[in-house]
Image (cartoon, grey):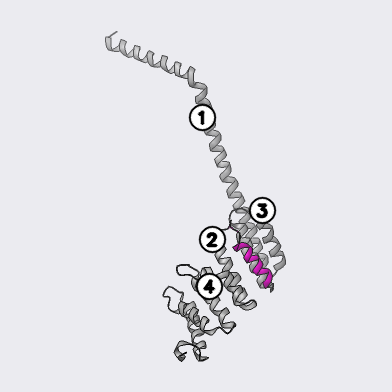
Amino acid sequence: MSDDSFIREVDEELRADRARDLWSRYGKLLIAAAVLVVLATAAWRGWEWWVERQASTSGDRFLAALQLSNDGKADEAIAALEALQKDGYGAYPVLAAMRAATELQKKGDTAGAVAAFDKVANDAANPQPIAQMAKLRAGYILVDTGAYADVSARVETLAVDGNPLRHAAREALGLAAYKEGRLKDAEALFRQIADDGDAPRGVRERAGVMIDLIVAAGVGETAGS
């Protein structure tokens, strides 16, 4: 046997001895760690499956409620949506709350609709964009059924520069002011919309119509007031 072969055999034997020593010391720990990895992976996969199942179930229930609404079964749709608010998953409870408020409005229950939108708007757990949309929806209902102060209490904070809903909020305030005969206040709000290049075309056109009506009444800026 050559010296090189002897050295290799000794080296291999030493490695085997070290491996046996490490296994005798840490083998149980390695097995436990491997089992934990398998269990954690299984638990994560199980959680993902449960989340997907819950979201899918809630989505199916939401679509079923919408179908009831489309079929003219408003009361059944509202009942289904209220149930989904209680035990739905993910974003579906708040979506169900918004849709239930819409159903109440369609039925002519404006007070109930406003209360439902207010509930969504005042729930700190809801995402801000949805809460703000709920405020706006309540404000628009109150343009017809409430006073300027009622509308302002919901949408005034949305009418500020930079808010994505400012155009709609200003329109609601302008309409409420016009309804109460506060024509100068209404004109100022509609001009804010008309002068805002980021305002949607339809909103700007409606604002222009309202400005023309106010001017025709002898109150607007063009009339020299």
Image label count? 4
Q: Which residue position holds label 2?
A: 128
Q: Which residues are magenta?
A: 110-130
Sequence-wise, the earlier of marks 4 and 2 is 2
Secondary-structure class at tag 3? helix
Cα–Cα gap, marks 2 and 1:
44 Å
Relative image position of residue 198 (x, y in whole percent): 43, 73
Tell me the chief SS of the magenta region. Answer: helix
In the rendering, at what x and y percent does residue 205 appear? 48, 81
Q: Is residue 61 magenta?
A: no
**Would you place residue 67 above or below residue 3 in this image?**
below
Q: Nearer the viewer, residue 196 or 14?
A: 196
* Residue, disc 1: 34
Cα–Cα gap, marks 1 and 3 = 37 Å
126 in magenta: yes
Mark 3 and mark 4: span between their CA atoms? Answer: 32 Å
Badge 4 element: helix
